[in-house]
Amino acid sequence: MNISFTKKQEEYISEQVQSGEYQNNSEVIRDALRLHSIYREKVIRDLRMEIEKSWDGPDSQRSMQEIIASKRKA
């Protein structure tokens, strides 16, 4: 597998290895992917909870057009 990184990303990876916290570049990437997975799962879980709260909450008295218009103003 080939992966391309920006110069800034390469520097960050190298700094992490040089700090002694990681043995090599692969460890940095594996840790980043692990943390990304945890973060993504949390975001999805939080979104599902908000959707469930909306479904269980009271119906809105606003029309769809009113809701859309309010989002355009924001």
Image: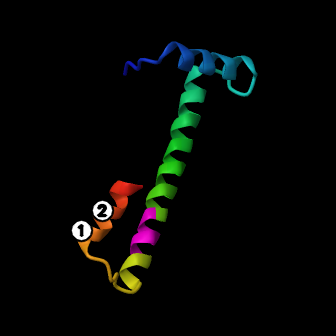
Classify residue 13 by image quadrant. Answer: top right
**Between 69 and 17, the one nearer to me in the picture:** 69
Locate the N terminus and report the quarter of the image it occupies: top left
Above or below — where is 47 with respect to 20? below
Residue at x 55%, y 24% (from the top left corner): 26
Which type of secondary structure does the marked residue at label 2 adopt? helix
Residue at x 29%, y 70% (from the top left corner): 66
Secondary structure mostly taken by the magenta-highlighted segment of the chain: helix
Check if mark 1's residue and mark 2's residue have beta carbons within 8 Å.
yes
The label on residue 65 is 1
Which region is colored magenta? 47-52
Amino acid type at image mark 1: Gln
Is 54 on the left or on the right of 35, as rendered? left
Query: Residue furthest toward the bottom?
Result: 58
Locate the C terminus and report the quarter of the image it occupies: bottom left
Residue 51 within the segment the image draws in magenta = yes
Is 50 on the left or on the right of 20, as rendered? left
Residue at x 68%, y 18% (from the top left corner): 15
Q: Which residue is mark 2?
A: 69
Residue 49, horizontal then vertical, whole percent = 46, 71
Residue 35, horizontal then vertical, whole percent = 56, 43
Is 25 on the left or on the right of 45, as rendered? right
Which type of secondary structure does the marked residue at label 1 adopt? helix
Query: Residue furthest toward the right?
Result: 20
Category of crowding for the residue at label 1, using alpha-carbon neighbours closer than 10 angstroms: few (below 14), some (14–19), many (at least 20): few
**Between 55 and 15, the one nearer to me in the picture:** 55
